[in-house]
Image (cartoon, helix red, strand yellow):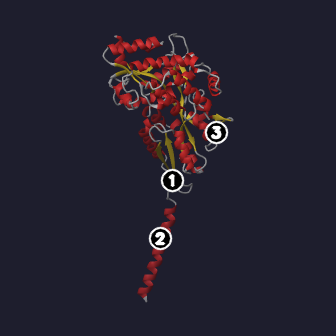
Amino acid sequence: MRKFKRVQWMVMLLLLVMVVSACGSSGNSASGGGSADSGNVKITLLNSKGEILTQLEDAAKAFQEDNPGITVEIQPVPTGGSPFERASALYASGNPPTMIMLDTGDVEKFKDRILDLNGEKWNADTVENATTATTFDGKNYAFPLAVEGYGFIYNKAVVDKAVGGSFDPATIKTRNDLEKLFQQIEASGKKALVISPMDWSLGAHYLPLAYAGQNKDMAEVNKFIASLKAGKAHLANNPVFNGLMDTFDVMMKYNIDQASPLAGTYERGPELLGKGEVGIWFMGNWAWPQISGFDTANKEYGFLPVPISNNANDYGNQEISSAVSKRIVIDKEKATPEQQEAAKKFLNWIVYEKKGQDFLVNKANIIPAFKNITLPAADPLGKSIQDYIAKGKSEQSMSTLPADHWSKVGSSMQKYLAKQGDRATLVKEIEDYWKNVK
């Protein structure tokens, strides 16, 4: 009987331990998004800047160290994929990320599904016009992550040798100046340049110079785009478009890959430029992490604008294209209030904490869109862009183009690069695209 009672007591004690254990563990469980009670919130960020994936993952770890109750998972957009399409697919599956890194032009398409961020402190600390393109009905829906610029990146060691002295980028003011430099580089035993044939480079960066170059006033540029949509603008007799394509013809003539112009990859560009096998590469400041891996010029690189004529005073010939290119938005359909607050905390960490600023400027080589971040650009390409902006020599990039512009019009540019279509064909395809765009 005593043995039975002892067993009975042991069973009761065991049950009591299990109940207490279960109660205790329930307060520490981290379900998908966590909860206010758990103290452990998981948030996700869809990253569309593949070149900073590692840096972003490291930043997430650093943020987690400062905020032990929050876990940040970085989800990459597939290489070459559209962030708009990936985000749309995730929404369709009912599983959107907490935060999404979008191109500027895509923010408005999601504005009914994302948070109004107008009340966030960092809005007051942004550089001029940083939130204009993502403000609708007086509300800003996106965090401006990066100011980016692009043009001809030059390897100073190569061009110094080519010109027989210290190269001054201010000497390149016209198309003829550019071609002369190409010739000097080739005469020195190097190839002049490499054209990366990706649709996003040709369709989202090169061709849009023809739109932005129409006028320094963006309101006039917007009118030009509206006239393209209405079928009233004719590129065949447009001097800026034809000037830009005349420059592209010169580029094709000196392209290291002219025998197989569509065979190149993004990864080939930084290697050729960094190793000094070519003197110039058309690309943006985001490419520095890759170039630095092959650097033979002691970090001496800079930008040249893309000239569109032989009149040095024509707008665009001495201006570098730059704008806020990437934005982070916060989901409001599936994200819990706790996840939304954690996401806001992450964005504030980037702007106001030393570790966040260090990630942005020194690790990711990003030009900040915030006045309070006074760290100088950590890389030569960022410094070059900042110099052009400081001198008033910047041209607003076309950051609000339709989501399919780069793939459709970029494809037309690829045909032109491969000499599979002439300029008349290119003009027709670009005009047809704008007349049918949604």
Instruction: Of the two numbered discs 3 and 1 on the same chain, state the one appearing first in sequence.
Output: 1
Residue 416 is at least partly visible in this image: yes
* Along the line of sight, the residue nearer the viewer: 10 or 138: 138
Q: Quadrant of the N terminus?
A: bottom left
**Is label 3 in a helix, a strand or a loop?**
loop
Residue 376 lies, in percent from the top left, at 46, 26
Element on which disc 2 rests? helix
Name the quadrant containing residue 190.
top left
Residue 131 horizontal/vertical position (percent) = 60, 32
Q: Front-most of 381 and 58?
A: 381
* SS state under label 1: loop
Q: From mark 3 to mark 1, how far is it between C-alphas?
A: 25 Å
Q: Which residue is mark 3?
A: 119
Mark 1, other Cα within 10 Å: few <14 / some 14–19 / many ≥20 = many
Q: Residue lying furthest right in this view?
A: 137
Residue type at tag 3? Gly
Query: Label 1 amino acid?
Result: Asn
Circles 2 and 3: CB atoms closer than 8 Å: no
Q: Which residue has dot 1 on it?
A: 40
Q: Position of residue 294 (x, y in %)?
A: 33, 29
State the residue in front, 53 or 221.
221
Q: Which residue is mark 2?
A: 18
Left or right of 12: which side holds 212? right
* Residue appearing at x 45%, y 23% in the figure: 383
Residue placed at 49% from the left, 66% from the top?
A: 22
The residue sitting at the left extreme is 189
Q: Which amino acid is tagged 2?
A: Met
Label 1 vs 2, first from the N-terminus: 2
Task: Tell me residue 179's x, y (percent).
Answer: 42, 13
Q: Nearer the viewer, residue 99 or 81?
A: 81
